Amino acid sequence: MKPSKNKNVEYSEGFYKPPLAVQKTSAEIINEARNTLRILRTQRPFTPREEQRKLFGSASSRTPENRPPSAFSLHASSFEWVESRPVSCARLSPLDHKPKLLSSPRNNEEHHISPPKSPIDSEEIRRISNARARLFRTASHGNLLPDKILLPNESKNTLNFEDHPTTCDSSGTRGESQNLTVQLTFKDKCVPLTYKEHQNKIEGEEVYSQMTDILPSPQCSNQCDQVNGQESPSSCLENTEWTKSATVSENTLEANETEEEENYWNMKILPILHELESEDNVERLCHACTILYKALEEGNMLCKRFKRRNLLLKTLYKLVDIASDVLGLKLAKIILGLKVSGKNLLNVCKLVFKISRNEKNDSIIQHDQILDSLLEVLRAEDLQATTEAFLYCMGAIKFISGNAKLINEMVSKGTVEILLQLMKQINEINENEARFSSSGHLLVQLTATLRNLVDLPQSRCKFLDSEAIPELCLMLEKRMNDKDVCTNVARIFSKLSSFNDCCTALADCSRCYVLFLALLNKHPKKQDLVIRIIFILGNLTAKNNRAREQFFEVQGSINTLIAIFQANCEADLNSKLLKGDGDIKNLKHPSEAEDVLIKLVRVVANLSIHPTVGTSLATNHHIVTLLIMVLENKSVDECEELVINTTATISNLSFYQVKNSVIQEKKLYIAELLLKLLMSSNMDGILEAIRVFGNLSQCHEICDFIIQRKVYKFMIALLDTKHQDVCFSACGVLLNLTVDKSRRSILNEEGGIKKLIDCLRDFGPTDWQLACLICKTLWNYSENVSMAKACFEDDESNTLLVILASFLDEELALDYNLDDLRDYHKLYWETEFKPVAQKLLQRIQNCNF
């Protein structure tokens, strides 16, 4: 053991906690690690899950008449069968549209589609029509596909219908192919069908051999009633709107469509469409849609410039009436892939929205990867032209994000980046624009989705990389009147601010404090918003001393907190009067008012860590009076977290021994209130009460109170709890009591000396702060005593000599501690514990000898 430099020096003054030094020593810095002034933590406000998936939940501030509907009817008739396209006067350069074509017509076998065989009689036709009718909610609009594809070798034959003659006109083109036009007359209307006839006879025969097996017969099963070559005009196709458009579109296609594209359509796509027209089994329809999407993708036909796009879409729209969510999703995926716009884009987004409202469909949504299509809509479409479609698209994405099993996939597909980019576009909308209001509905869905996604660490990284936090603050500023948007943003911030890096980024947005206070003043009665903003402020002030100062410097900040504090105290008191005490004690969770008070008291406690702010709060009559009111009206059994947080806040404020301190002014009344908490069985509450007594016991009036009310006996008894922090705080009170010579004898009661020595032996090696505190208390106790026996019993004196000698052996003492704490313990051991222990050891040795 190294000899002490102060071996022959005796100190007569007592040890007690001095006022805060201007220049902090290393020991004082270490001492602060004991959390003399402590931040408080609390749980994030709970957001109940909506029982039903809706665009706007039950807590929405939007009235039903002022918001888009979550429920609506959707049928095939809702879609526009012919999409209008803007006519351009400019000559456009051709697109690089290179379809991936089959090398041979035989590749059709890859799709495993077996189109239905032709009905052989009218009875069979009626059977299929009746079976298909049961699948649809509304009547069919008529067959959209030509009844038969004219094959190359058929071009040499004359097609005859007994009742309606058909003329045939063919002409050669470029010596390689011929155009065959066959006009079928229905009710005096002609539907021209074109087909390019190949001159290569071998290739034509191969095509014909396959098509005769897979294509339907000339009979139109659900529109015509033709038997043995006879046809009734009244039973033929009645929907002439499509036939008119078909005439124009087919003629246009003839000029632009390549031979390879036409072959691909006939061999790959058309058989599947006939399958969709005639099939009456939902499962087979779903399978056909899957194959169709794959064929379109392979042929590079999933685009807006696809030549026969309208014909394909009309077939798909008809199937919307079939009541099957699985089929609906497959249809939606194809329709979205074909880049529909306008009303059709809105309706297909509504279709996906309706399906995603049912949680049971989450698995098929994941399987069909409809999310990719929805994200493509948000990425590629124009926001201004399709705001309503974006709304339902975003609503579906919101529902998907509510499934914890799907959010990882969503984040990996870039959902966060797409939503943040969309949010920036919406933020650019001026408040005076007509679409500002409708974009607010969209923001509700977007922010609700982001709220779900920020639970993942990778999402939070994307938020920081994309500088999303300043954009969210801008959104709060522009949407201050929209309670739903503000609440969702507050929910996002309440999650983000729970993590250090995000909390730091938010604290760096100095504008956020003004915004949060403005929201508190604007919506003081919207509890779910108020509680989250206060929770965010609690997080900011817990981790950043600059944040404490910035918040305090905002004009009216403390007055806003006081107003909310007062309102919720009154609401809680009124609620208590309406209910019986028994009902209140049986509540498992805090009430709304109590929850706000818990979070608000935490903000005050965290703010008080800053010296300037803490001093100001300690002298604020309104703040201290409200804190005292909580202790008057609440017990730890009634609302544990609120009472404990309030006591901890008083402990922080009592640290400041300043002039005009309201805590010092009302210290005796506070001490009286704390006795109730000391007598409880709640150890956390007892610990907080002791800490307050530790600060207040620096005053003679409180020391007299402790002696008169026998509180010191309770402190001595707590030394036996084997709870390290409780022993530390109790020993601090005893240390302050022993500063006065007239009170030192209290340690002889209740076995006080023996219990202090036991604590020193048990906790000293792992807690040099507690060991130092015990040595200071024993030093005060033994001051000006010539014989150790007058203070300590023989066994106590000998035990102290052995313990102190071992603790002063540096190598032995530091071996008690873990390697990662070695430097910390060594510094405190050298600067604080060692000088006091050496003096105490020397005093005991001198008295014994």
Image (spheres, grey):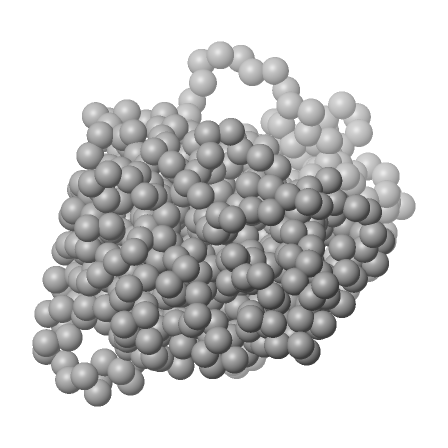
Residue 622 visible? The answer is yes
Name the quadrant of the C terminus: bottom right
Identity of the residue drawn at 62% across and 27% down: 256
**Rendered position, 628 above or below 39:** below
**Rendered position, 306 above or below 118:** above
Residue 142 visible? The answer is no
Horizontal and vertical percent position of residue 592:
25, 65
In the visual, does 142 lie left or right of 516? right
In the visual, does 619 lie left or right of 589? left
Front residue of 499/142: it is: 499
Identity of the residue drawn at 32% across and 27% down: 429
Q: How many marks?
A: 0
Horizontal and vertical percent position of residue 272:
65, 58
Query: Splitting the image into 4 quarters, where does residue 358 fall?
Result: bottom left
Identity of the residue drawn at 63% across and 20% down: 94
Horizontal and vertical percent position of residue 356:
46, 62
Identity of the residue drawn at 42% across and 72% down: 746
Front residue of 372/551: it is: 551
Query: Splitting the image into 4 quarters, where does residue 95 fall?
Result: top right
In the visual, does 710 lie left or right of 281? left
In the visual, does 500 lie left or right of 291? left
Front residue of 693/82: it is: 693
Front residue of 566/444: it is: 566
Looking at this view, name the residue that lies furthest to the top: 90
Horizontal and vertical percent position of residue 761:
68, 70
**Rendered position, 535 above or below 339:** below
Looking at this view, name the residue that lies furthest to the bottom: 582
